[in-house]
Image (tube, rainbow, N blue to C red):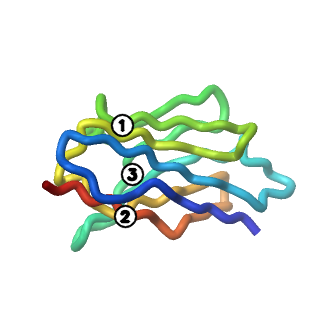
Amino acid sequence: QVQLVESGGGLVQPGGSLRLSCAASGFTFITFSNYVMSWYRQAPGKERELVADISSVGGVTNYADSVKGRFTISRDNAKNTVNLQMNSLKPEDTAVYYCNALRGPYNYWGQGTQVIVSS
């Protein structure tokens, strides 16, 4: 069974940085490298939104306009991990951040990690 475990969240001051990591395991006939990996976030009272994703082949990345130039998504297929480097954090980045793995009908979520940006 596929399992995604996020880590790296916490409390940070505005302008600070955090690095989120997602460790993936349990892949069988479809390996980690074949999944599109994404980070989503959900702020209190708001819908879950896509923050960034990275393709299974070629490492093509896509970002929400609100995080472009500040966040960087990366993946290590040898280690089955995907990371989100978050710089110049703003209070509006406060949310629970979720890791997602998607390929066709196979769609998996982690439990989330809380990020709070506050002075």
Tell me which label, 2 or 3, sits earlier in the chain.
3
- Numbered mark located on residue 71 in the image: 1
Front residue of 112 and 28: 112
The secondary element bearing badge 1 is classed as: strand
Residue for point 71% across, 38% down: 77
Query: In what quadrant of the picture does the C terminus appear?
Result: bottom left
Q: Amino acid at mark 3?
A: Leu
Mark 1 or mark 3, which is nearer to you?
1
Alpha-carbon span between mark 2 and mark 3:
16 Å
The residue to which callout 3 is attached is: 50
The secondary element bearing badge 2 is classed as: strand
Alpha-carbon span between mark 1 and mark 3:
12 Å
Q: Amino acid at mark 1?
A: Phe
The secondary element bearing badge 3 is classed as: strand
Q: Quadrant of residue 117?
A: bottom left
The residue to which callout 2 is attached is: 114
Residue for point 52% across, 43% down: 83
Side of 26 relative to 113 (left or right) = right
Residue for point 35% across, 57% down: 49
Q: Quadrant of residue 60?
A: top right
Report x, y in % for residue 116: 26, 60
Q: Looking at the picture, does residue 115 appear above or below residue 68?
A: below
Report x, y in % for residue 14: 17, 46
Q: How many marks?
A: 3
Report x, y in % for residue 16: 25, 41
Alpha-carbon span between mark 2 and mark 1:
16 Å
- Residues packed near mark 1 inside 10 Å, few (<14), some (14 to 19) or many (20 plus): many
Query: In what quadrant of the picture does the N terminus appear?
Result: bottom right
